[in-house]
Image: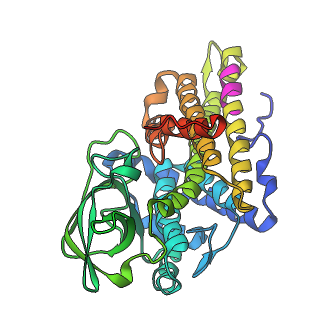
Amino acid sequence: MADRPPVTSDFYDLEALLDEQDRATLHRVRAFMDEQVEPIINEYWTRAQFPRQLIPGLAELGIAGAQYSGHGSPGRSSLFDGMVAMELGRGDPSVATFMGVHGGLAMGTLHLCASEEQKERWLPAMARMERIGAFGLTEPEHGSDVARGIQTTARREGDEWVLDGQKKWIGNGSFADLVVIWARDVETDRVLGFVVETPTPGFSAVDLEDKIALRAVQNAHITLEGVRVPEENRLQDANSFRDTANVLRATRVSVAWSAVGCSRGAYEHALRYAMDREQFGRPITSFQLVQDLLFRMLGNITASAALCARASQLQDCGMLRDEHASMAKGYSTMRMRETVGWARELMGGNGILLENHVGRFVADAEAIYSYEGTREVNSLIVGRAVTGRSAIA
């Protein structure tokens, strides 16, 4: 038998773009996912529960809010942050989503929209993952049109704000310590941001059940009934939906990286399977059609990762625009959907068994494909940039 080459999906060695320190941390993340997450994740995925016992180990990696500086955050590059998201997604998309919500959406909002006093009050504990964050934007009746359709209201009463409304699909929402809630000021019609610390009277969160994707992520349906938030918990630099969009632009690139990770995880499991599987008296890796599937998957992964790497570089030098983030997210998730499907195809019927892992990536890809901007919306953002005309109603 010929010597087996190592199983890797970094075909163009993009990891070499990182410095030695960042590569070492990336390898620690990879080892954690392989050694601590992979052996248990199928059980939690089946039970639709998040393995919270992993949180201390994730905290020790020092990756929460990696691309932000100060207040306990490590201040690494967006490129490093993206590759970490990819490694998390390669191991398990649910864990990647948990970290994306906490370290990206929640901590990112505070870094970009909070006052210095607020940052010091909340961020160090979040960086240590002693307090977990969530991000409440999407509503039951408003997803893609949430910029114009936010129905959750904020009413000022003296030194307090009263919040009423509902939020849906809120990752970490049922167990988070801090939830960023976006609401419309009934007096000015402006979209404002608030930090609701749980438990707070009038705040309730119920996990959504019977999901077919990202089952280990606990998405909550949040109800706010007369929730009183002190003025000191209103994010001082969040005064319009434009501020919300600044957060989403950064995290959309991270989601694109997570999609590449999902593709990589499915590909690597399929490649290992193909190396061991024999049919017609020989390993299936010797079949032309199997090698063609591997070529297609690896091509998608390499192209998507290269696109994401450039988007992260633009982010690091302050040149990232909405259309750049949308191209990265839209393209990478389209290619992800193809790639996980081909990985399942390569494995035949065995691909639908959780014990072979690929089926989990196939299912989870459906959620990544839609959240943080659907393909349709991202295509229209890019279309507006290249034509000068908006096709969004």
Q: Is residue 383 above or below residue 258?
A: above
Q: Residue at x 37, y 51 (%)?
A: 148
**Frontmost residue, 353 versus 117:** 117
Image quarter of the N terminus: top right
Camera-side residue of 312 and 161: 161
User: Residue at the top extreme?
Assistant: 280
243, above or below 268, in the image? below
* Residue at the image position 53 percent from the left and 32 percent from the top: 337
Along the viewing direction, whichever of 113 and 264 lies nearer the viewer: 113
Total numbered badges shown on the rendered structure: 0
- Does residue 27 show up? no
Instruction: Please give left or right for residue 238 compared with residue 174 in the image.
Output: right
Q: Position of residue 332 (x, y in %)?
A: 61, 39
In the image shown, does 210 or 273 lie closer to the viewer?
Answer: 210
Which x, y percent locates residue 320? Answer: 67, 54
Q: Is residue 390 left or right of residue 172?
A: right
Asked whether the viewer can see residue 48, the reply is: yes
User: Which of the 4 image quarters holds residue 21?
Assistant: bottom right
Using the image, determine if residue 318 lies above or below residue 214: below
Residue 348 at what x, y percent from top left? Answer: 51, 21
Q: Main secondary structure of the magenta part?
A: helix
Q: Which residues are magenta?
A: 292-298
